[in-house]
Amino acid sequence: MVRPPLPDAVPLPAEQQEEDDAPERRTSTVPAELHGTRLDKMLVTMAEEFSRNHLQHLIDAGHVWVDGVGAKSASRKVLAGQRIEVDLVPTAESRAFKAEPIALPIVFEDDYLMVIDKPAGLVVHPAAGNWSGTLLNGLLAHHPGAAALPRAGIVHRLDKDTSGLMVVGKTLPAVTALMRAIAGREVQREYLALIHGRLAEEFLHIDRPLARDPQSRVRMAIVPGGKPAQTDVARLAVAETADGPVTAVRCKLHTGRTHQIRVHLASRGHPLLADVMYGGRSVLGLQRQALHAQRLAFEHPGTAETVAFEAALHADMALAWQQVVPGRGGI
């Protein structure tokens, strides 16, 4: 749970921050009934709120002592009367929801919401492997009210390596209204993408259900019975390159499933450039998937007026785009 901010968001003194970040140390003596049991099982009796797996990590990291000597193995047997000490260093998950000053490329901001032009490489929400340095951490530092909002006001996400526009609510009513608008398919989201191959159709409507890939939980796939997913694809230009034909397209989402555009286009034999997960190759200088959230339009939750925003392609994709659509690098 996120700790509520201090009044007027006054930062804690450095020495107080260090004190708050210091782990709790617990001490116990091995009772007779646990004589001969494993060290990690003893630790479970001392810190039931932590998983056994996390406690094993604490042993490996040198945060556990037996009679004052650092423990090396979770499987070692403890003896009745031995003194066990453990520094309860919090899990990465519990430390994830902390404010971190991060430069946020803000396109628009008022009392209700923010529109951000997310750079490729910025993770939106803390998760395994990315417990800090995320957009959420930056939002918590940017405005105090974020700490009281679900997911700090984030109402939709972009993949780590997708660039472009996102809207974030700054009040609970705004967050609720935006989430309802997204669920009701009232938010217009358009993307620019570069795909392998020559797209034959000038316009393509893809309606294929998506779910987790049964063979790999990190991927999505076309799965009968999955969640409905619909994408409109408009061909903008086709170019022959040294690495084969490349097509520039504009995609409009009717639904917002995880990896939707990436999977839908790959399912038609046209993976995104540099999208290695779904069959793309790193060509035209791109080292990340060629996908950019270029346009965002919705009803403002405070004024009820329709607002629209556009973001030019970021430098890496703009250079690649110019090789397919000359003269329109910052479309």
Image (cartoon, helix red, strand yellow):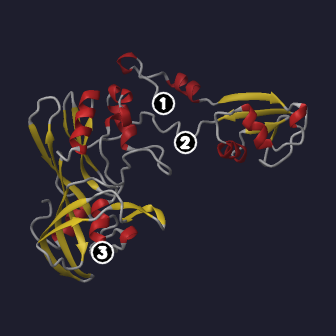
Residue 308 spot, x, y in % from top left: 11, 44
How many other residues sit within 10 Å of disc 3, few (<14), some (14-19) or many (≥20)?
some
| Label 2: element kind | loop
Per the rendering, the mark at residue 92 is 2
The label shown at residue 1 is: 1
Pointer 1 or 2: first along the chain = 1
Label 3 or label 2, whichever lies nearer to me, is 2
- At x 82%, y 44%, the residue is 38
Q: Quadrant of residue 262?
A: bottom left
- Residue labelled with disc 3: 283
- In this view of the protein, can residue 41 be seen by the observer? yes
Q: Nearer the viewer, mark 1 or mark 2?
A: 1
Label 2 Cα neighbours within 10 Å, binned few <14 / some 14-19 / many ≥20 = some
Residue under the point 37% across and 21% down: 9
Q: Nearer the viewer, residue 167 or 330?
A: 167
**What is the quadrant of residue 283 in the picture?**
bottom left
- Across and down, in percent, residue 27 comes to 77, 28
Quarter occupied by residue 211 = bottom left
Secondary structure under tag 3 reads: loop
Relative horizontal placement of residue 182, taking residue 44 as reference (left or right): left
Q: Give the residue type that dot 2 points to.
A: Ala
